[in-house]
Image (tube, rainbow, N blue to C red):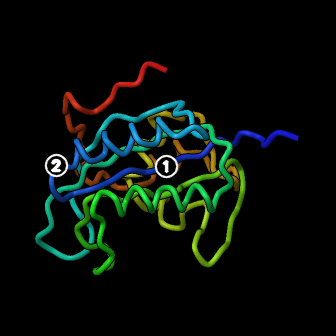
Amino acid sequence: MAAARVTAAIALGGNLGDPPATLATALHRLAAHPGISITACSPLYRSTAIGPEGQPDYANAVILISTLLPALPLLDLLQQLENEAGRLRTVRWGARTLDLDLLLFGDENISHPRLQVPHPEMTQRQFVMRPLHDIAPDGTLPDGRAFSAITASLPDSGLAIWPDPRWPSLDL
């Protein structure tokens, strides 16, 4: 029996080095994986860093994928890409070259020591919800809450499109 494809949402972010280029490289690496098809890609956004003061702004985006990978192997792949991009996990919410968060995995609720899905903080973050809503305007969380309602309830945090010619405009 063949593995079933699952639609997953992944947030991409980074604020060290050249964030648009780093996010574009991660996107291309994901697209090249044989078990992943990218089905939607949000615009690239600029957001103010949360966490320790003095950090540069973040580049943020969200993609939707169709995947044959189970959730934990997908998480392993995301963490491998973060590590290859020079990600260091020394300060909570500290500056980073690349952050790849598995937001949603089908309509599953996953509670595992290494993975919580839906991502536990996604509904409090405009820099996650707005790009997710951009690519899935009719989307809902597994509990039925609409992306549109969540996005509308969040304060405008100064999130802005980050125009960069290296950011893919995937014609899917």
Q: Between residues 144 and 15, which one lies in front from this camera angle? A: 15
- Residue 154 is drawn in which quadrant? bottom left
What kind of residue is marked 1?
A: Ile
Residue 12 locus on image (x, y percent): 38, 50
Q: Residue furthest top?
A: 171
Q: Is residue 44 left or right of residue 36?
A: left
The secondary structure type at the circle numbered 2 is loop
Residue 34 locus on image (x, y percent): 57, 37
Residue 124 locus on image (x, y percent): 44, 62
Residue 35 locus on image (x, y percent): 61, 40
What kind of residue is marked 2?
A: Asp
Q: Is residue 123 above or below residue 151?
A: below
Residue depicted at 29% across the width and 57% down the height: 85
Question: Number of labelled discs?
Answer: 2
> Pointer 2: what residue?
18
Q: Residues within 10 Å of mark 1 (few under 14, many from 20)?
A: many
Q: Residues within 10 Å of mark 2 (few under 14, many from 20)?
A: few
